[in-house]
Image (cartoon, coloured by chain):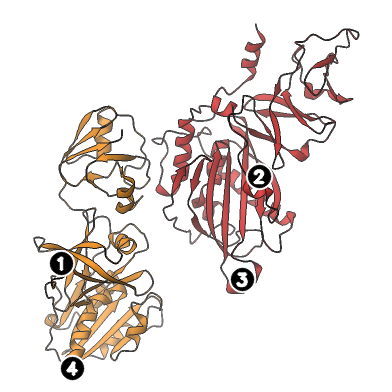
Amino acid sequence: MSSEGSAVSSRLAVVTARQDAGLNICLLTLQAEDGAPLPPATPGAHIDVHLPDGRSRQYSLLSSAPYRIAIKALRDGRGASQWLYDNLAVDDLVRISAPRNNFSLREGATDTVLLAGGIGVTALLCMYDTLSAIGRTVSLHYWARSQEETFLHAELSGKEGIHIHSCGGRATSMAAVMAGHGPAADLYCCGPERMLTEFAILTRDRDPQRVHIERFEADSTGAFPQTDHGFTVKLARTGTTIAVSKNQSILEALIQAGINLEYSCEEGLCGACEARVIEGDPLHRDSVRTPLEHNKRRTIMLCVSRVRSSDTLVLDL
Amino acid sequence: MSVKTILHELEGCTDSALLNDWHVVAYSTELEQGRLLPVTLMERDLVLWRSDSGEVHAWDDLCIHRGARLSKGCIDRDTVVCPYHGWRYNDQGNCVLIPAAPNEQPMKKARTITHPVRERYGFVWVSTGTPEKDIPVFPEWEDTSYQKVHCGPYTFRSGYRAVENFMDPSHFPFVHAGVNGIYDNPDPIAPYDVELTEEGLVTSEVRVTQPYGDPREIPVIAYYAYKCLRPLVAYFKKRLVIQNPEDQHKGNEDDRFCTFLTTQMVDQQTSIVRICCAMNFNPQPTVEDVRRRQDIVYEQDAGIVDTQRPERIPVDLRQELHHRSDLLGQKYRKWLQTMGITYGVF
């Protein structure tokens, strides 16, 4: 999913329900903080969910009234989804963008085939619901690693036109599914990169107007906002003030100023340079602790943390 | 030259944090009556013996007269006899006979250099300074539902590296492949917490998969909770969950396996690890089964730990490279540094 249209306004939403929806998957219902209706959205739309550390991540809307999104925690535990999965509970506030749609549905199609891999199914379920409701021919083929990792397995497996496939070697292939649908069919695919590549190859000879891909952005720590700026760090114990430039870590600036510090990895992976914050609004970027934990403990990792505004950060050093 | 200067000459370590601490130097069972046991603690040579009263004594292994090793002598009528001129010392360390002047009361200064000594948990603990704290607590020792098995001794080069290794769960799949971890499928180590408490460094539980995690020889999921009680004493308690449904009858959810590990630094590059395992399984494994497994694991550890250079552990975290899964090791090194320890560290 692309991040175009970054000027879209954001608002606070409240989590009104949280439900387990498969292994490491939760289904969240969001409503506007003030109870007003959230902006309408078309099938295939997604919203940005903002994390307290400045990162954001896109999630497909399963429904738009109310907004429902599914979050799958990825195994490496470093990503934004993991954080949201671990931290969001009912009554929590979360900042979201208005919906955007780069994957819109041709509701007039006579035959629609939805091809989903893993959590990519969330981009297609709203389409399935919409087409089913208006009586169009639609089939949803969903490849999942195992039953327990299947999103809403019990609910989906009973529905007409939904086929859940395992990913094993003898499972139904995407090619076999597509062979059953002629050139008039509209094909939608959302899933991991490997599946999208295979889909692109299999649809080479089809009408591009009838082939729709939703790219599922990798969940990584690489999605930091590119809004870095310089700021000032004040060391409370000595009263020293040190300027941290835009291209420099706090750690680098302190070392340059001759401050003797413990550190090791310089990438936010080890925890050696943890320091206590006395004042300021830090931006956390390490994988040692979650931003929530950091905020509770009032700590940062000097090697990767920054400051949210251009304010001064006062450290217990 | 004063006596004090000679003692300084004989003493390898001058860190008060180490000198004023208790160190295990033997198993209680090694001290049979009538035996003089020489041991070395941080380059200081000591002699241990058990008097008729049943008490253990720890003295400098030297006769105040001419510095000969008392451990080369013998025990006769509840006195230690120096092999050189036959001076005899009673269990208080006082010389009671100088054979060259048999009718003379030996001078008051004719005393051995004695050290505080205690027996606890089946180990002999000595301090060559003035202990500031009691011997650390081994909670399962008094609990009769736990079977206790002493294992070792195991020889390592660096004592601190041996302790750090004991508290490191991420080496299991590699150093103990097939026993404590799976080489082809190593467990990711989830972030865990380390707190510095009155007791020492204490961690939250760390989860690992163990194909052969305890003497029952069945696959388990083990949850390790570590405590580093002193610079050279550490402990873990692991909670065991049996993996295979067909093995469930071999244990229950209260199953725990603990290890209390002690390290005697002989010098900066030689250490002796002695452990006591405690387990509450039902049925309990045999002592031989427990020892066989521990012998394998510690031998595998020593094979790697003894290759670590420098042998003196770097306590400045800028040396070597740390990861969050090594958090306990990082805190351990910082702790040693904060205590002002210089002996055996880089």
Q: Is residue B78 left or right of residue B224?
A: right
Chain A is which colour? orange
> What residue is disc 2 on?
B275
Instruction: Determine the CA span between mark 1 and mark 4.
Output: 36 Å
Label 4 CA crowd tier, 10 Å (few <14, some 14–19, many 20+)? few
Which amino acid, by three-letter code, is at mark 4? Answer: Gly
Instruction: Determine the CA span between mark 3 and mark 2.
Output: 29 Å
Residue B105, picture quadrant:
top right
Mark 1 and mark 4 lie on one chain; the one further toward the N terminus is: 1
> What residue is disc 1 on?
A34
> What residue is disc 3 on?
B248
Pointer 1 chain: A
Comparing labels 1 and 2, the label whose residue is closer to the camera: 1
Residue located at (27% from left, 55% from top):
A221
> What residue is disc 4 on?
A135
Whether residue B6 is situated above or below residue B114 in the rendered picture: above
Percent across and percent down for residue B112 are 75, 18
Labels 3 & 1 near each other (Cβ < 8 A) = no
Mark 3 and mark 2 lie on one chain; the one further toward the N terminus is: 3
Whether residue B5 is situated above or below residue A316 in the rendered picture: above
Chain B is which colour? red
Pointer 4 chain: A
